[in-house]
Image (tube, helix red, strand yellow):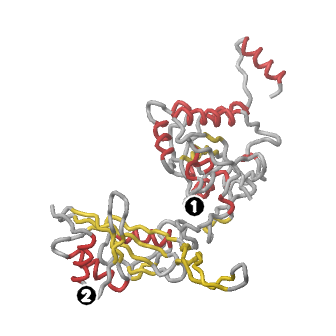
Amino acid sequence: MADDLKDLKLELSKNGIFTTTLEELYNWGRKNSVWPLTFGLACCAIEMIATTMARYDLARFGAEVFRPSPRQADLIIVSGTVTKKMAPQVVRLYNQMPEPKYVIAMGACAISGGPFRDGYNVLKGIDRYIPVDVHIPGCPPRPEALIHAFMTLQKKIEEQALRGESRPRHLNANEPSEFPVPAFGAHGLEPAQNDEVFLNEPGNPLRILQ
Amino acid sequence: MSALPTAEDLKAQIEAGVPGTAVTVVPNGSPSAQHSLLLDHGHARAVALFLRDHAEFRLDFCSLVTGVDWLDTELTEKLKVKKMVAGPDGAETEQEVEEVRKTKVPGYLEAVYHLFSMEKKHGPIILRLRTANRTDQTHVPSLTPVWRSCEFQEREAFDLYGIVFDGHPDLRRILMWDGFEDHPMRKDYVPPADDILAAPRPEAHA
């Protein structure tokens, strides 16, 4: 929104007149009803469960219903080590979610393989196959960190413009909504990364050393 | 509670109880002194049955099966050899000369079994089975027909080390997928190149 419009809005609100835009209203509704998928992989999932319980109460942010079906979920929290055997299933679940959909990579394992990054069976970061919106470091991250990630995601949703080049993926028919599921190969997953998602270039500390 | 005999006594009892078998005691030099018994392939199952059903041992529970990968090694020996050596004046004399001789010891894969007795409350007795080499003769007899609890663990040793257990009822990979070709726990396993991240490993805490 242009600055002069913002000023006008502020001026009007000072005089008791509430104005909004369709974009604001739409994003306000979206950011307060992000339903995560009931999906956990390892010890991070225990922290994720704790986050949803009474003490940390993720319901305050409109995410109280974890949906047991990807068809009803908006957010997949990749909470834990993704093994190579599990990776195709994670991508498949993500593909089954309807747009708009978001990904939080929770913990060191989901980001890079974490303490298991030398393991023969561990995927070195879920962002090799699906686009990640928020990364949270930690092993495991505390519930506060997950809440912070959630608020970061809400901010990201709030700031999305509905028109123009930077509009979200679900409003752009040319953007993909499904991503190729890796196959089990003779020595590892094939392909090892999705080049359209994974930034395998200098500057990414998780790029592949070749 | 009955005490188990020492490894040497056990070897003697097994060889008396199972005719034709040859058991080798593999000593363990550490303070635990848990010596183990190396079995020959032909009598391994008979020995296992003997240990399981023997009235005194009753080793009815196999708690663990694992694999060990022993790489090819090179033995270096220094030998004194008599040789004709040309002296400074050109005349050849017989002298004792030190020679370094290197012999290659082929590696092998090993399956290790830990046995306990639930009935007699004793154990462990450790059995070993060795393959002929690490490449094409990687067979050992399966002990799953004797102890049912070996089934998944022998599959794991097959998956990760490539030890083939003859007589196993359902020998498939258990952790990796069926089309996988490597054996990741072998010491010469090389992970695929795209598994290596550019970021340096964090420094170990001193």
| Name of the residue lying farthest toward the bottom | B20
Q: Quadrant of residue B202?
A: top right
Give the residue at x 39% y 76%.
B129
Q: Position of residue B90 (x, y in %)?
A: 73, 84
Q: In which quadrant will I find the C terminus of chain B?
A: top right
Q: CA distance from mark 1 to mark 2?
A: 44 Å
Percent of width and height locating residue A123: 60, 56
Front residue of this view, candidates B142 and A94: B142
User: Label 1: chain?
Assistant: A
Quadrant in the picture for residue B182: bottom right
Secondary structure state at the residue bearing disc 2: loop
Name the amino acid, label 1: Tyr
Q: Is residue A160 visible?
A: yes
Q: Residue at x 44, y 69 (%)?
A: B67
At x 52%, y 51%, the residue is: A69
- The image position of residue A29, as x and y in percent, is 63, 34
The residue labelled by disc 1 is A120
Q: Return the residue at label 2.
A: B19
Q: Tell whether B10 sits left or right of B84.
A: left
